[in-house]
Image (spheres, grey):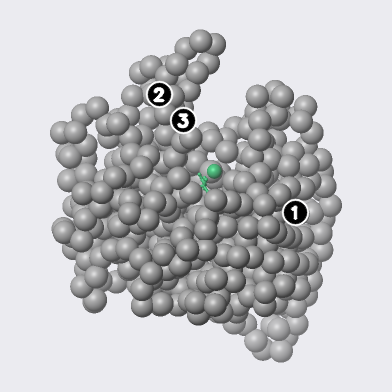
Amino acid sequence: MTNQLPTSGAAGSWRSLPAAQQPPWPDPVLLREVTDGLSRAPELVFAEESDRLREKMAAVARGEAFLLQGGDCAETFEGTTADAINGKLRTLLQMAVALTYAASVPVVKVGRIAGQYAKPRSRPVERRDGVELPVYRGDAVNGLEFTAGSRVPDPRRLRRMYESSAATLNLVRAFTTGGLADLHQAHAWNRGFVDDSPAGRRYEELAGEIDRSLRFMAACGVDPQELRAVEFFASHEGLLLDYEEALTRTDDRTGLPYATSGHLLWIGERTRELDGAHVEYFSRIRNPIAVKLGPTATPDEALAYIERLNPQDEPGRLTFIVRMGAGQVRKRLPVLVEKVAANGASVAWVCDPMHGNTFEAASGHKTRRFEDILDEVEGFFEVHRALGTHAGGIHVELTGDDVTECIGGGDEVLVGDLHRRYETACDPRLNHRQSLELAFLVAEMLR
Ligand code: PEP
Ligand code: MN
């Protein structure tokens, strides 16, 4: 643990550049009060932890580990409950076990958690029944409720974002190191999920095999400590630069600035302008970072991100999260990967099979088809296999709850089911079964 001091200068260099997707805060004085307070608050994560994740991401880039990154599209303050957080963690641990056991590859576990409270939006306003209001931008900014009052950006929500993130991280740390994440508990992770599904049964079998392996090892006198806890990291989109700047701290080991709001931050598809504020801020922090690449991303852009964000070509520093859509990935990804590989740069390639596959069902629900999600991951693996590069991981939106937000999957959710339990504050998430099923299918691709 190091002393991390408030930073000035470097972390604020973004202010002279155009910053996309920043809320129109109505009260700049209040915003300043809140961010001043945050800049004196304890950091949420430590620089050393982010360094360790950077090393793990270097293994991902080399093809020696696989990244599993997942969680809500948008966390909410109300959704910050022990049950919800436990459900997400157990789902991710189950997926990680399926991937590790089936493919014998170490899995780097990263949540979209403890900081995923701000959303970039395609339109600044939302219209319902002839009424137009500012769009919901995440609990960090305004309220989901469709009323004029709730949609006014309130900077005090940034303080709540910090507090909710801290409460979530506290539980994550207790869960992952306090015995509950012990591999001997693999059966218990499945408990409480309504899960008489093919994937659920398959998981039970797998947990049984793991039990036998562990008993065998114990009988041989082997009981590795590594199985008693897991390393779990927190990530979110680094969207709100006032918040991120306020939580940037100088690491006293190195004298360098780190974002301490989470271990890994990414730049979203809508804020990745090369000469914009987000790229500038990200160029100043030492954390492992990622950039989302949609279907319009060009090879020259990819090289320019490498030049701007990882000029020293440090392994594990930069990850590209590709979100092209199932119909585009086979066509558009090869040129990007080829050009980056030819450049010799070490980046990790990760597949987000969610954001290029969203559509609106006739009922008005935003949804995604499980088959499209699977198809995009398959396309991503095919491209890397053909080029001799590494499919480094998956980035998914999921919950441990039994929601009906994405359609399809073995235990089929139909379009007509969407209304039954549609709870997301933003994009549709895989439910527990769909998440497990995806993990088993990806494990086969990895093998
Ligand atoms: C997201 O991750 O929720 C998101 C908005 O993704 P993208 O930036 O890729 O559209
Ligand atoms: Mn999303």
Report, in whole angstroms, how far the alpha carbon at label 2 lies from the one at label 1: 35 Å
**59 or 282: which is nearer to us?**
282
Percent coordinates x, y for residue 30 in the rendering: 19, 33
- The reply, left or right, for residue 65 in relation to residue 53 is right
Residue 204, above or below 101 = above
Would you name the residue on which mark 3 appears?
Answer: 123
Q: Amino acid at mark 2?
A: Pro
- Label 1 SS: helix
Report, in whole angstroms, how far the alpha carbon at label 3 lies from the one at label 2: 9 Å
Would you name the residue on which mark 2 appears?
Answer: 134
**Do the residues under discs 3 and 2 have CB atoms within 8 angstroms?**
no
**Do the residues under discs 3 and 1 have CB atoms within 8 angstroms?**
no
- The reply, left or right, for residue 201 in relation to residue 275 is right
Q: Residue at x 44, y 24 (%)?
A: 125
Q: Residue at x 68, y 57 (%)?
A: 331
Would you name the residue on which mark 1 appears?
Answer: 375
**Do the residues under discs 2 and 1 have CB atoms within 8 angstroms?**
no
Res. 224 image quadrant = bottom right
Residue 400, above or below 209 = above
Residue 343 visible in the snapshot: yes
Residue 170 visible in the snapshot: no
Farthest-out residue, bottom: 220
Q: Alpha-carbon neighbours of circle 3 within 10 Å: few (<14), some, or many (≥20)?
A: few
Indicate which disc, 3 or 2, sits on the residue closer to the N terminus.
Answer: 3
Indicate which disc, 3 or 1, sits on the residue closer to the N terminus.
Answer: 3
Indicate which disc, 2 or 1, sits on the residue closer to the N terminus.
Answer: 2
